[in-house]
Image: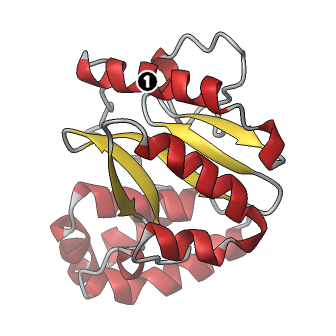
Amino acid sequence: MQKNKSVEEFISKNKRWNEALLLLRSIMLSTEMEENIKWGVPVYTINGKNVVGIGAFKSYVGIWFYQGVFLEDKNKVLINAQEGKTKGLRQWRFNATDEIDSDSVFNYVQEAIQNQKDGKEIEIERSKVIDIPEELRVVLMSDADLNDSFVGLTAYKQKEYAEYIATAKRETTRISRLEKITPMILKGIGLNDKYR
């Protein structure tokens, strides 16, 4: 992921989608939202709460609504890009600049702003129980120092490691992943800390 320091930098790096990004940005700036860069991409907020983001990909440019599940979606244009994973987030994709209907986009954005002001928000369910895969459990039980280091990690970091092992389909992959993460756990480092 590119770490852009400004919206201008983000747009300039996405030459194929310059015109579309400038158009989407102008729509966002015509509202009361505040423009920010978060995770290297433009994000528009109300009272510090994320409302809309803009993204550019190889085959499309799009906007996402952080609480898009609450939008009426009269035009049936919104999709859940990660079915089963994202509950509130919805995307609107454009394959060409001329597909962007400024009035429609503006109306959706205004509805999203009002929803945010009204407090419509999906509460994130945080599971307290972390499902530790058997391979990781065996390694932790056989090494007291490693177990102590793992227990000392935040629940979020523990979950990252557990999912990293659990999502490997092959046993050889799980073993190589265990070998990779063992020194990281001992140092108290989270799996994805270098990206934060």
Residue under the image location 62 percent in, 49 percent down: 23
Residue under the image location 66 percent in, 26 percent down: 78
> Seen in the image, is 22 located left or right of residue 127?
right
Say which quarter of the image contains residue 47.
Answer: top left
x%, y% of residue 107?
53, 21
Residue under the image location 52 percent in, 51 percent down: 25
- In the depicted view, which residue is nearer to us: 189 or 110? 110
Say which quarter of the image contains residue 181.
Answer: bottom left
Quadrant of the image containing the C terminus: bottom left
Q: Badge 1, how many Cα within 10 Å: few under 14, some, many 20+?
A: some
x%, y% of residue 115?
35, 18
> Seen in the image, is 86 located left or right of residue 104?
left
x%, y% of residue 94?
76, 42
Residue under the image location 59 percent in, 47 percent down: 24
Question: What type is the residue that disc 1 sits on?
Answer: Gln
> Seen in the image, is 187 located left or right of residue 28?
left
How has the structure been colored for display?
Answer: secondary structure
Quadrant of the image containing the N terminus: bottom right
Say which quarter of the image contains residue 151.
Answer: bottom left
> Seen in the image, is 39 located left or right of residue 144?
right
- In the depicted view, which residue is nearer to us: 133 or 41? 41
The residue identified by callout 1 is 110
